Image: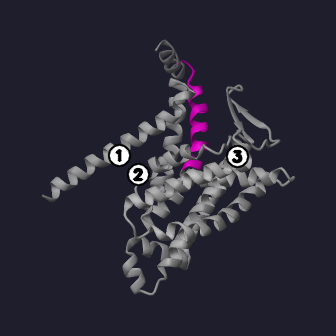
Amino acid sequence: MDQIFSNISLLFEFPVVNISILLEGLMIGSLFALSAYGLALVWGVMNVKNLAQGDFVVAGGYVSWYFSGFGMNPLLGVPLAFVMMWGLGWVIYKTVISRVIERDLFTSLLATFGLAIMMAQLMNLMFGSDTQSIKLEYETLYFFDDFVSVPIAKLIGVIMALSLAAAVIYFMKTSRMGQAIRATAQDARAARVMGIDTEKIYAFTFSLNSAICGAAGAIIVMVWLIQPFYGITYSIRAFVIVTAAGLGNLPGVIAAGLGIGALEQYGAHIFGIGYQQAIAVLLLLFVLFIRLLQQRRSRQALQ
């Protein structure tokens, strides 16, 4: 307990520590938001809660890490992971997801949970259980008399994540496919009546989600670590963000991702890095509790 109070007092005695924590939180939060936006798409359009979301992120990281071993520039691993994970997402949709869209919630959860286990085990067999990362030969920027450090590699990762998010937003708002996806999300039956091939929309949406996760994983492996069984950590955070922001609320997804990233870094500073995952779980429980209270109030208002 004394250590916790000491860590808290450090935030007030040396305000510059807050800047370092916030920068780190915002950088990783941008990647949380990117993978969560893919989950929001699948959830909103197909009503499928993808428990394998984080495993798609890790798989994208392994794509970039594997090909970097052949001398490929790690920055090229982001578009490569995007393309390869798009193909994997399409295959998984045709073989698994298409069979559970019209089923009940339990069936979709069970199917994606099994998919998560299978992907983790396959990555473990193919790449081993050791943590992996790509070391980029970039310098580190220092500010405030070297108390705050910003690795250029992480800065590049954030820029790439924000650029991809902006490209997806532009695509969803301006393209015919983006309009069809939004129409299907609002009312799939009405979309079919209007001549939209919802089966094609579902396949495209799930493939896009897989590709977004793959790109996020390729960025993560450049600045953090990946391991076959790390998928659950990203899945939990994606569910927290989407539940807090709501489906279809892209600004909310981005804000929630950045906020959760910052909260986790503060929690890790105060309680220790070992409690970082527990903070994400507590946030999920807190968000679900708030949503439950909101639903009860809305029911009382209708009565």
Q: Residue 73 magenta-drawn?
A: no
Q: Hey, what amino acid is under mark 3? A: Val
193 or 174: which is nearer to us? Answer: 193
Where does the image place residue 120, in percent across and percent down from the top left? 61, 49
Our reading of the magenta stretch's main secondary structure is: helix
* Residue with the mark numbered 3: 221
Using the numbered discs, state the Cα–Cα distance from disc 1 to disc 3 in whole angstroms: 30 Å
Residue 20 part of the magenta segment: yes
Q: Which residue is mark 1?
A: 288
How far apart marks 3 and 2 lie (CA) works out to 26 Å
Residue 160 image offset from top left, x and y in percent: 68, 54
Whether 137 is drawn above or below 296: the answer is above
Q: Against 154, is 171 above or below?
A: below
Q: Position of residue 287 (x, y in %)?
A: 37, 44
In the visual, does 233 lie left or right of 286? right
**Mark 1 secondary-structure assignment:** helix
> Marks 2 and 3: in contact by CB < 8 Å?
no
Residue 296 seen in render: yes
Counting residues from the start of the chain, the first of labels 1 and 3 encountered is 3
Looking at the image, residue 96 sits to the left or right of residue 137; the answer is left
Res. 49 visible in picture? no
Which quadrant holds the C terminus?
A: bottom left
Q: Amino acid at mark 1?
A: Leu
**Which residue is labeled 2 in the image?**
243
Please tell me which of labels 3 and 2 falls first in the chain: 3
* Dot 1 crowding, Cα within 10 Å, few <14, some 14–19, many 20+: some
Residue 166 in which image quadrant: bottom right
Range of magenta residues: 13-32
Alpha-carbon distance for marks 1 and 2?
A: 7 Å
